[in-house]
Each structure stands twice: as structure tokens, then as C-alpha cells.
Amino acid sequence: MHGFLSYLNAHFHALRLEFWGLLIGGIGSGIIYAMVAIGYTMVYGVLRLINFAHSEIFMTGAFAGYFTLNYLIGSSSPTGITSILLIVVGIIAGGLTGSFFAVTLERVAYRPLRKRKAPKIAYLISAIGASYFLLNLAAKEFGRIGRGIAQPYSNHTVFTIFGANVEMYNIIIFLAAGMMLIIVDRLVNKTKLGRSIRSVAQDSETASLMGVDIDKTIAMTFVIGGFLGGAAGFLYALNIGVLYSMGFTPALKAFTAAVLGGIGNLRGAVIGGLILGVTESFTVVFFSGAYTDVVAFAILVLVLMFRPTGILGELIGRSA
Amino acid sequence: MNFPFIKKLSIKAITILILSELAAVVTGPPGNADTPWIGFHDSITQKTSFFGLFVTGRWALFYALGILSYLIVYFFNHNDFKNSASDSLRSSYRSVAGKKYFRLIAMFAIGVVVVLLPTIITDPFWREAMVSQIAVFILLALGLNVVVGFAGLLDLGFVAFYAVGAYATAWCTGALPVPPLFGSHVNPFFAIPVAIILAMVAGVILGIPTLRLRGDYLAIVTLGFGEIITLFANNLTGVTGGAQGTKQVPHFSFHVGPLKYIWGLDPAPYYYLVIGFVFLFIFIFYSLEHSRVGRAWTAIREDEVAAESLGINPLKYKVMAFAIGAASAGFAGVMTAAQSNFLTPATFTLSLSINILVLVIFGGMGSIFGVVFGAIVIQTITMYLIHTPPAGYQPQDLYIYLGALLVIMMIFRPAGLFPARRRQRLDVSTSSFENSND
């Protein structure tokens, strides 16, 4: 017992020392989870199903960003306004590719089932199949070795908070992701498109009676979710690089984030993503790096068991 | 401009074009991250022979095949031929298949083929594959069929139970770094009950917390669970031997009184052992399907709320399905461990779970015959592709085709090639999709 207490004490001491550094790292990964989680949560909102292939949308976005930047940068090392422009171009390339694949996925793997009113298990199997198809096709076309991305900026410590370094990468992610999240929030809550998405999420039959084009709205939901997912893939790849199987773990964590915040709830997804990112970052102190993925998974199982509606509750108050 | 017919036709032509380009890319040569378009470029521009008639671009070949298959489907759907031909075929099949003597003859023929198979097949690759890649996969598919087909629970981490069975065998036979279960090394026969029980316990442990969740959550939780088992097998080096794998697992041996037999390197004895268990599991699962338990599974699968209102405890029966399905995976694990003598975590991947799922979906969820058929057909094709790979084919490319097959099956034939007699509600759900409350 004493041994355990001293173990905890030593680790909490380490946690106190590294608190700010871990917090910054956690927010950085958390905001990426949040972006991916929005894709899950929006699709769940309108279709009531988990888009299993979202991990591959993340991956395609990352690859699109990778190729675009490699093509544009070559061997130069851009600075200043060029860096910003390059990052914006990368985000747009990743996002548009993500949107394209998300819409195609909806058209090919989901819509035929939706027209037939197929049960849920058919969607899940179809989604798993599409996910595996894309994953392994990417492995075949782009090789099975991870690649670093051409850096559009020089990474350096910008300033320090309480002894923790805040790097350029953290600032870029925070600004880019923060802006996109705010835009999506406004889009869903204030525009006509957002209203139609919300109406389909609440009651699609009634929405269609009120003149909402269901197919178009669902496709637009995939466009928005796919854009965020693809852009998040690019931002993630800026730091980690690209690999055909890179989508799996972040997507599983983003799904956890979506459930944690309350699936179907946009702001919940953001809160869930940040909480998950920070929690995971802190647990590095307690477990070896190999088991950090287990932490996210354990959170998922615990949330599903004890509070399946998540922190903010589901959009339409459904329970598991 | 209003030519709906031409518009419709051109949409169809473009769709076929896109699909044929995709098929050309999927089957074409691989690329790499430095020259990303080389795979696509080569796939489109490569020339190939059109049934030996004339040489053309691969894309054109696929386009021609696409149009041909579209026309065939169109012809079947828009002619009386469809009904008359398929009806007469079906009725003639029924009139023969329904007869008792036909069933007996068919069963006898299958039995003879099954028994004689090791003497018919002489190629060492196929002798090996027929045990480790086909017979063992029939066991795995039968187990997953209980979970996915009978109880309607999508388990994407089924390989975890397979891993539990395999590592339990390694444990009993002393191939793990930890001391063996019975104190000393025993031969894998004694590991069979241990592996099956441990796999069933794993099923119960995983099932009790997760089976309360609704279907889509269950799928993602089992997916994570399968990954975590691999993670532990890789990282708990002191228990599992880590990524390096286990020490040598001995072969089966049989030593009672004067009778002594050791399963050696020849696959044939393993084949008979596995096939014996395949028939045992088929018998058990068939009996279960037609028992009170099987009817409870069907009821839960079709409508959980209604089943509950009839006094069925859904959690109890779902956990039961998990445990019973896990039993056959656990036994498959014993066979793999004892035959290959060696285990690494790299065997037990998510891809393998998906592979097993494809066998079940292709043959027909819930139909034992369909699942065995699916396992034999798909695994034979897989092995054929490994044995004599076409140009540009790598073993990992298999999952491109399996993934596509899952989507195609779900779109065109969700109940599989041989739909279960107690039909799953896969074509149309009775409740309205938009308002479904499950």
C-alpha cells in the first residue's frame, strides 16, 4: 500500500512539474479530435449511424495536404505570409478532398441502403467495408511507409507559459482549428442550410413535408463533416506525417470525444475532444506511451456504460 | 432540351466508366508516396489483351466488361425470361432437393470428398492451406456467425477470442515466459478445454459491460477491444513474449496405454482433427439455432423491445451468444498454435476480424451452410491469389477486394448468397428508418 502511495506521489509530482507542457500538448491533440468528432456527430445527428469510414476521410485529407505541400514547397523553406498561405492552401486541399470522399461514401455506401430502409447492422457493415477499401487502396497506391510532410513554416518556440514552451505548431493548430470550429458552429446555428440540417436531425419525415430536400441536406452534412475531417487530417499530418493507416487511432479517439460530449451535439464534440486530449496527455505521466490508446478506450467504455448521453446530452435526448 | 432517355443513359454510361476506372486502378500496379500518380497512371494506360482477341487499354477492357454485365442484368430484370427461367430453375431445384434420398446422397458425397481430400490434394501449399487457412477459418466463421448471424450483434473484435485461445494453448504447453498452467509442459490436447473455457470467459467479461449498448456502439467497442488485445500481446513481453512471439508450441500427441500417435509436420492428421471439430461445432450450433436459445436470439435480433416484453432477458442471451461464439474461436486458436508451433501478435489483427466477417456476410448471416460455403470459397480464392498471384498483386491488397465485397453485398444481396431460412430483416426493416427508436 505504501509502495503504491509513493508511486502515485512520485507521478503526481511529475505531473505538477510538467503540467503546463502537457496541457498545451493535450489541447493541441484535443482540438484535432474535436474537428474529427464533429464529422461523427453531425452524421449521427442526421442519419443516426456511426460513420465508420470517417477515419479514412481523415487519411485522404492528410494525403491531399501532403501532396499539395510537397508540390508547392519543393525544397524551399517558406517564411512569413507564404507560410500562412501554404497552410491555408493545405487546409483547403485536405478539406475539399475529405468532402469529396465523404460525399462519395454517402452516395455509394449509404444512400442505396437508406432508400431500402435497411436496418442499422447493414450500414455498419457497409461502412466497415468502405473504410477497408479506402484504407488498403491508399496503402497500395501510396506505399506502406510513413512519410514526413514538407514543412510550410519553421517550427520554433514562440513564447513560454509557466516554463512550458508554446511552439509555432500549437499556435497554428489552435488558430486554424478554432476558426473552423466557430465557422461550423455559426453555419449550423445561423444559416438556412444549418436550419435544414437541424430539422432533418430532429425529424426527417416532418422536415421533408416542410420542403427540406433530405438527400441534399444529408449530402451537405457529409460535405461539412468531411471538410473538417480532411482538414484535421492535414493539420495532424503537419506534425506526425502521413501513413495509410494513420486515421484509425485518431478517429477512434474522436469518436470517444463525440460520445463523451454527447453524440449529435456539436459543442459537446468540441468539449469532449478537448477533455479527451488533455486527459490523455496527462496520463502519459502514469502509463508508458504504448498504453495511452487504452486510456481513451477505457474512457469510451466508461462513458457508454455510465452516461451514454455524454456531458452535454444528446441533441434529441436519446439514451443508449 | 429534354431528352430524359439520353440523359439517363449517359449517367449510366458515366457511372460504368467511373466504376471500370476504379476496377482498373484497384487491380492495377501499385504506386508509392514519392510519385503518387504512377499507380493510377499505369493502371489506366497499361495494355492488356481482350480475351486474347485484341490488345487494348485495361480501362477499356473493364469498361467493356462493365457494359456487358450491365446489359446482362438489364436483360434479366426487364424480360419475362427472368421470372420463367429462375422460377423453373428454382422449382426444379426444389423438386430434387426436397427429396430425402437426394439429401442423403448429397451428404454422403460431401462426406466422401471431405474424408478423401488429403489424398486428392498433393501440392504442399494447398495441403497446408486447407488446414490453417480454410478449415480453421470455417471454425472462426461458424463462431462469428453465432454472434452476427444468430444474435445480430456486430462484433468487430472477434479475433480477440482467437488470440485468447491461441495464447492459452501456448500457456498450457509452456511456450510463454510465464510458468505453464498445470505446472509442467503438457501436450496441446489438454489445452483444448482450457482454451475454450478461457475464450468463453473472455466473451462473458467483454460481453457483460458492452452488450447493454446498442448495436453501433457495440461495434466500435469490440473494434477497440480487438485492438487492445493485440496491444497487450505486443507490449506485455513478460507474459506473452511480446512482438517476438512465443517459444515453440509442441504438436499434438496421443499416448494412452499401447496407443501412441504424434501429429507431425504433415497437415493431414490436423485436417482430420479440425474437420472432426468443425462437424461437432456445426452440430452444436445447428441444435442451438433450433432450440429455445436460438429462438430467443432471433427474437432479440429482430426486435429487442418486443423480445424483452415476452420475458426474454436480452443481456443474458447476448452474453451467451458471445461466449458460445468465442468457444469455437478459442478452439481455432488451439489448432493454429499447435499446428504452426509459433504465435506472434501480428497474426491477430483487425484485418483478420474483417476477413472473418466477410466470410459470414458473403455466405449468408445466420445460415450455417452459407457460412461454411462462404469460408471455403473466399479462403480458397484468397489462397489461390497468394499461391499464384496475378501481376502487381500483393497479399495485403486482398483487403481492398474484401472491403469492396462487403459494400457490394450490403447493396445488392444483404442476406448473403444463401440466406438463412429464418430470414433476418436485412432487406427492409419493418419500422420506418427515420423514426426507428433502436
Image: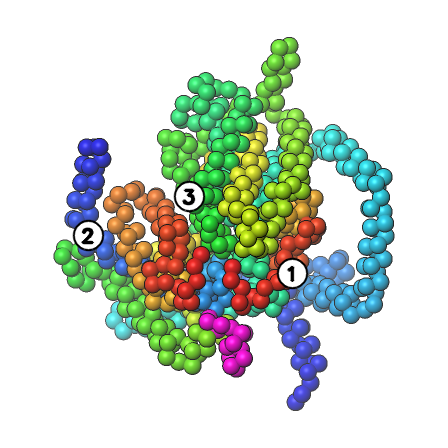
Is B324 above or below relative to A214? above
Q: Is residue B54 left or right of residue B388?
A: right
Is A141 above or below relative to B184? below
Q: Which type of secondary structure does the marked residue at label 2 adopt? A: helix
* Residue at horizontal 51 percent and vertical 81 percent from the top: A210
Identify the magenta region. Answer: A200-216
Assess disc 1: are there few (<14), some (14-19) or many (≥20) residues with their C-alpha within 10 Å of its C-alpha: some
Q: Which residue is mark 3?
A: B228
Assess disc 2: are there few (<14), some (14-19) or many (≥20) residues with their C-alpha within 10 Å of its C-alpha: some
The N terminus of chain B lies in quadrant: bottom right
Q: Chain of mark 1?
A: B
Q: Which residue is mark 2?
A: A19
Please tell me whether mark 1 or mark 2 is closer to you in this view: 1
Tag 2: residue type? Answer: Phe
Q: Where residue A305 sits in the image (x, y, percent)?
A: 40, 50
Out of B427 and B36, give the one closest to the viewer.
B427
Is A234 above or below relative to A294? below
Tag 1: residue type? Answer: Asp
From mark 1 to mark 2, how far is it between C-alphas?
Answer: 54 Å
From mark 2 to mark 3, how far is it between C-alphas?
Answer: 28 Å
* Residue at horizontal 55 percent and vertical 35 percent from the top: B327
